[in-house]
Amino acid sequence: MEIKDIVKKVKQIEIRTRKKTEASLMGQYHSAFKGQGMTFSEVRPYQFGDEIRRIDWNKTARFREPFVKVMEEERELTMMILVDISASMDYGTKNQLKREYVAEIAASLGFSAAGNNDKVGLILFADKVYKVIPPQKGRKHILSIISNILTADYVPAVSKIDKAMEYMMGIFKRKSLVFLFSDFEDTYDSKMLRVASKKHQLLGMRIYDEKDNEIPDVGYALLYDAETGKEVWANTSSARWRYTFAEAQKQKVRALEEDFAASSASFMNMSTGADYSKMLYNYFQKK
């Protein structure tokens, strides 16, 4: 895309996602993610119903009447967005490319975080980590993240989720909200999910095109793997072949759901063009 097209696309995504975010997601986001703890705010006179353990005994003794410490939530959090930029993510047959769908969801998450004064960072990965944008606050930073997801070079390589997770945990020590975007077409070490979810709050999002799950009857077709370059002829007219392919994809999704559940992490299976705001709203509510 040319620069003017990129700017236009980013602006369109901003307009669409900010409407959705402000209408429903921001409040749920704030309620779901409570921050890292409590910090001192002020001291005020005791009121009926206040907890005794909040009494400021020094000020109470000085003024000969009870005072309590008022605590407030330490709100600031860090959100990390991990995006698979292997070639299979630069694909779409109906509504939009996977990368465009990811950019929209990431924008919605980013604006929710920005509205709560949280920091947002980005890691782009495939067979290795290709780019890291450190966590920062603000609208301009979120727009930069959207632009980077849209304009990244999606590489013909097998994605290695393990390496991306290991890198993130090595760099970001503080507990973070981690949103992992991939089509999960490649294998990964499930142990890494368990390690990551113990340290961070993890949501894996499988982004798929409808043709990833079911291939239509188009006769003999040359199928091409965008990541490995492997080509294979298939008789898509065969009902048995199509059924076997579809069942294999269903089993893959079931295995993903089981791996994430066993790791105490969350998982979503999201088709391009689907209303992601409803799914995120429900996720925030459950949290």
Image (cartoon, rainbow, N blue to C red):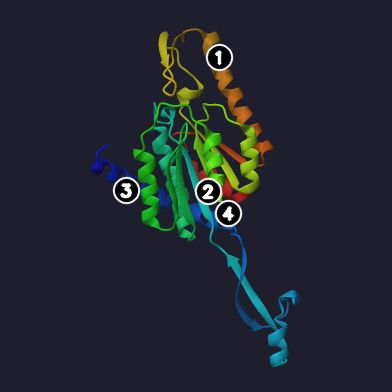
Instruction: Say which label, 2 or 1, has the lower sequence index.
Output: 2
Depth check: give the residue in front, 282 or 176: 176
Q: Quadrant of the N terminus?
A: top left
Depth check: give the residue in front, 58 or 164: 164
Depth check: give the residue in front, 76 or 12: 76
Disc 3 vs disc 2: which is toward the camera? Answer: 2
Q: Which residue is labeled 4 in the image?
A: 174
Instruction: Say which label, 1 or 3, has the lower sequence index.
Output: 3
Separation of marks 3 and 2 at Cα, in angstroms:
31 Å
Q: Residues within 10 Å of mark 2 (few under 14, many from 20)?
A: few
Q: Position of residue 12 (x, y in %)?
A: 33, 46
Instruction: Say which label, 3 or 2, has the lower sequence index.
Output: 3
Separation of marks 3 and 4 at Cα, in angstroms:
32 Å
Q: Which residue is labeled 1 in the image?
A: 243
Separation of marks 2 and 4 at Cα, in angstroms:
9 Å
Residue drawn at (36%, 55%), measured in percent from left and top?
A: 140
Instruction: Say which label, 4 or 1, has the lower sequence index.
Output: 4
Q: Position of residue 262 (x, y in %)?
A: 69, 36
Q: Which residue is labeled 3 in the image?
A: 11
Q: Residue pushed farthest right?
A: 52
Q: Position of residue 109 (x, y in %)?
A: 48, 49
Disc 2 vs disc 4: which is toward the camera? Answer: 2
Whether residue 246 is visible, yes or no, is: yes
Tell me which amino acid carries mark 3. Answer: Lys
Tell me which amino acid carries mark 4. Answer: Arg
Disc 4 vs disc 1: which is toward the camera? Answer: 4
Disc 1 vs disc 3: which is toward the camera? Answer: 3
Q: Is residue 164 left or right of residue 16?
A: right
Label 2–label 4 contact, CB within 8 A: no
Tell me which amino acid carries mark 2. Answer: Ile
Using the image, tell me which numbered label, if any, was put on residue 102.
Answer: none
